[in-house]
Image: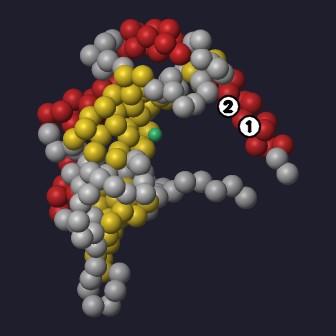
Amino acid sequence: MQLRWAHAVVYVKDMQPMLDFYTEILGFEIADRGPINGDGTPEIVFLSQIHTDHHQIAFLEVRKEVEASNSVNHFAFRVADLNDVKSMISTLKQDGRATALNPMSHGNAWSIYFQDPEQNGIEVFCDTPFHVAQPQGKTWDPQSSDAEILAWTEDNFKDQPGFGPIQDYYDKRETELADRG
Ligand SMILES: [Fe+2]
């Protein structure tokens, strides 16, 4: 048996502003919605942008107060490439609803961290061609060219433990996971 991460259900205070942000800015579509109790409340709204996943995230409007303290640090979404991450950063900056924008590279990822309108931590990232032992984190410059960012990443992480091509790491982990009792 293998457990694969599938979705999260998040308590929200004001449903509509959250739906607006997630659909207009992050590209989600509303897959389904409806009351979870017979009396019509509270409503749950399911969001997805992958056709084989009914929902990747769902909102339940039961949150009393918005405060940053929460048991979840952030939710992360993978995009295809650096261009997508850069484009997300421009969109978020232009839009202004997301806060605490923080471009961070872990050596194995190029990420933009931010907070959604209810201060949930969100990360949008793409993979780099590298693996490096974690945790790692350095601020990267989204204004640089892709080639500059690639060179900067190699330069900044190549002396850290475990640095190497991502495929080597995948191969090693595949063997380790297959070998476990
Ligand atoms: Fe993360």
| Residue 57 location (% of width, % of height) | 39, 58
- Residue under label 1, please give it: 174
Residue 73, labelled with which disc?
none
Q: Dot 1, how many residues are within 10 Å of its Cα: few (below 14), some (14-19), or many (20+)?
A: few
Residue 35: in sight, yes or no?
yes
The picture quadrant where one finds residue 114 is top left
C-alpha separation, residue under disc 1 versus residue under disc 2: 6 Å
Q: Residue type at mark 1: give it.
A: Glu
Q: Secondary structure at mark 1?
A: helix
- The figure's colour scheme reads secondary structure
- Which residue in the rendered view is the most extreme toward the front? 69
Q: Nearer the viewer, residue 51 or 25?
A: 25
Kindly check if marks 1 and 2 are in contact, taking CB atoms under 8 A apart as contact: yes
> On screen, 15 above or below 76?
below
Q: Residue type at mark 2: give it.
A: Tyr
- Residue under label 2, please give it: 170
| Residue 137 location (% of width, % of height) | 46, 26
Query: Going 29% across and 61% down the picture, which residue do you hit?
Result: 30
Query: Going 43% across and 57% down the picture, which residue do you hit?
Result: 71
> On screen, 96 above or below 145?
below
Q: Is residue 107 left or right of residue 72?
A: right
